[in-house]
Image: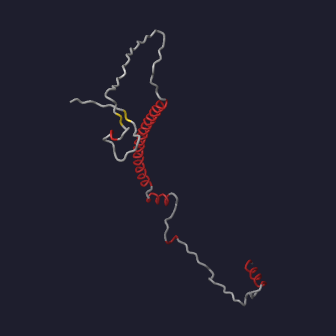
C-alpha cells in the first residue's frame, strides 16, 4: 500500500449547495479539482545567488541604516527628569521646613516657661498690703469708711401737675384750626 498525496486547486463553488460540505469537498462539482496523476508539477528550480562582498575604500562614507530616536521620546525623558528634579527639590524644602518647625517648637516651649515665670513675678510684685501702705503713708489717702460717706438731701417736695381739659387754651373739636393750635402749643 502506498500513500499518495493528491494536490489540487481550490476555488469557489460554481453552484450553491444545501447543507455542509466541510468534510467532503469532492461532493460539489467544480469546487475541488483533482489533477491528473500524469501531470506532475515540478517545483521551479532555485537560482543560486552569491553575495557580493562590500568593498570599503578609506575616506568614502558608506550609507548605513541607522536607528533614529523619536523627538517625542526625548522630550518625554527630559520631562520625566525635570519632574524628578522637582520632586527632589520638594523633599529638600520639606526637610528644611520640618527642621524649622522643630526649632520653633523648642522656642515656643522656652517662651512659655519664661511667660509663666514673669506671670509669677507680676503677681508677687503687686502685693495689696504694700499698695495700701504706699497709698496711706506716701500719698495721704484715707481708707473708705462710714464716716467718710456724705449724704445729699433734697430741700423741696416732689410734685406733679395734672392738667384739666378746661384749663387748655384751645379746644380740639376736630377742626383744622384746633389741630393747628394744638400743634403750635406742642412746639412752644
Q: Residue at x 37, y 21 (%)?
A: 44
166 with respect to 114 (left or right): right
Residue 55: which quarter of the image?
top left
103 with respect to 170 (left or right): left
| Between 56 and 82, the one nearer to me in the picture | 56
| Between 119 and 85, the one nearer to me in the picture | 85
Residue 1: which quarter of the image?
top left
Colouring convention used in this rendered image of the protein: secondary structure
Vertical relation: 165 (above or below) 95: below
| Between 151 and 140, the one nearer to me in the picture | 151
- Residue sitting at the far left: 1
Q: Give residue 147's position: percent from left, percent from top.
A: 51, 71
Vertical relation: 157 (above or below) 99: below
Quarter of the C terminus within the rendering: bottom right
Q: Give residue 179's position: percent from left, percent from top.
A: 75, 83
- Residue sitting at the far bottom: 166
Q: Residue at x 39, y 16 (%)?
A: 49
| Between 147 and 28, the one nearer to me in the picture | 28
Q: Give residue 26's position: percent from left, percent from top.
A: 33, 39
Q: Give residue 104's position: percent from left, percent from top.
A: 42, 43
Q: Residue at x 33, y 29 (%)?
A: 36
- Residue sitting at the far top: 58
Give the number of callouts: 0
Vertical relation: 142 (above or below) 121: below
Amino acid at each position: 500500500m502506498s500513500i499518495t498525496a493528491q494536490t489540487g486547486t481550490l476555488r469557489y463553488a460554481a453552484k450553491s449547495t444545501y447543507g455542509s460540505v466541510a468534510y467532503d469537498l469532492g461532493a460539489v462539482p467544480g469546487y475541488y479539482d483533482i489533477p491528473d496523476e500524469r501531470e506532475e508539477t515540478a517545483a521551479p528550480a532555485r537560482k543560486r545567488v552569491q553575495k557580493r562582498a562590500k568593498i570599503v575604500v578609506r575616506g568614502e562614507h558608506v550609507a548605513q541604516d541607522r536607528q533614529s530616536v523619536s523627538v517625542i521620546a526625548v522630550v518625554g525623558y527630559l520631562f520625566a527628569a525635570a519632574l524628578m528634579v522637582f520632586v527632589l527639590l520638594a523633599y529638600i524644602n520639606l526637610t528644611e521646613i520640618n527642621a524649622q518647625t522643630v526649632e520653633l517648637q523648642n522656642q515656643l516651649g522656652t517662651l512659655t516657661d519664661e511667660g509663666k515665670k514673669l506671670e509669677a513675678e507680676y503677681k508677687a510684685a503687686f502685693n495689696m498690703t504694700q499698695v495700701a501702705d504706699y497709698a496711706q503713708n506716701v500719698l495721704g489717702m484715707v481708707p473708705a469708711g462710714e464716716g467718710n460717706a456724705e449724704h445729699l438731701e433734697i430741700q423741696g417736695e416732689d410734685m406733679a401737675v395734672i392738667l384739666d381739659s378746661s384749663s387748655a387754651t384751645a379746644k380740639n373739636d376736630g377742626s383744622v384750626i384746633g389741630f393747628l393750635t394744638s400743634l403750635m402749643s406742642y412746639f412752644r
